[in-house]
Image (cartoon, rainbow, N blue to C red):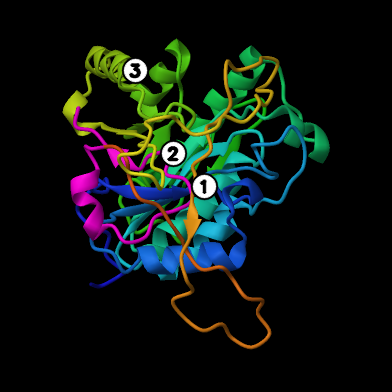
Amino acid sequence: MDMREAPAARRPGLIGFRISPSESAGADWVRLDETWALAGESPALDAGWLSDHLSDAARERGGPALESLTTAAALAHRVPGKWIGIAVLSGTFRHPALVAKSATVLDQATGGRFILGLGAGWHVGEHDAFGIPLPPIVERFDRFERGVRTIAALLSDAARTAPGVTLDDPDFSLRGATNEPPPLRPGGPPLWVGGQRRRGMALAARYGEGWPMPGNRPGDVAYFSERRDGLRRALADGGRDPDDFAFAGPAELRTNPGGSGRGPRRRRPVRRGRRQPPHARPACRCRAGRPDRRHARGRRASPGPLRLTPYDPRIAPSWPRIRAVAPQTRAPGIGYAP
């Protein structure tokens, strides 16, 4: 396929995988690279996703984690012809103009198959450690809304050439700004907005082309259905066709199909903004496979790409075709029809 032409579809197919590139997920760079390389060989997987944290989100503070945008760019060649998405970028980490320029590079690197997921940010410890302000939720979301508007303007067709786009904003103003070279995809990469409440869903309905269910609610069909139905109403009220909007939910996988049925161990809660969540992200139990290839001299040995076997009977019939998945598949990994 000519990588200079974006595909006609604006969303991936049914099944993808997600890795949180952090120590708690067992994903250092060598293992992450191997897992994505193996996933790139599987025709059953349509997309690879990453989360966005500056430290290990499973901890209150600190812990190894790889920055998501540079990691996605470095891994793009491992999954040729597949979509790459980030679910979701923290709106507090980067200026919207930098996000738009980075997304444009990834759009070109993936042949128009990059999904830009956007969120307001939540992890207290990483913001405090790196000196990044995490305002109270109302102020934080106000800035997030304006940031999404700025990103959408810079990715629009109006920003492809002069005179560019102009936007008055107290924090993210634009003055004849152009985004050159422009994205391959007309209108820029699809935006998926990760709002969970009224304002977030209204923002998704205005600017988004998709909505990712939070990774800490794997298999929660009731929650998924409630948010999906609410978003569909918001889309219809805004004059948009709900059937042109994508929804994705996480499936939780582990290594003991047909086992005890017990869920995986839960980590202790991690502070989200000023609030304490009812539970933390569940951990997936993984086992390491044997290395599928020799390592170049000088690189340390890896236990090999991570593999999972599903216990969910809705996924199990497809699993023989899905040879490699990430340590965690708890984000837009399994798509659901509207």
Asked if residue 296 shows in the view, the reply is: yes
Q: Position of residue 236 (x, y in %)?
A: 22, 16
The amino acid beneath tag 3 is Arg
- Observer-nearest of 113 and 57: 57
Q: Is residue 241 visible?
A: no
- Give the farthest residue toward the front: 260
Of badges 3 and 2, the one in the foreground is 2
Looking at the image, do the residues carrying marks 3 and 2 touch, with CB atoms under 8 Å apart?
no
Residue 284, horizontal then vertical, whole percent: 49, 42
Real-space Cα separation, disc 3 to disc 1, in angstroms: 27 Å
Residue 323 disc label: none
Q: Disc 2 marks which residue? A: 330
Which region is colored magenta?
313-338
User: Against 125, is 22 above or below?
Assistant: below
Mark 1 = which residue?
Answer: 100
Q: Assess whether residue 252 is covered by the magenta stretch.
A: no
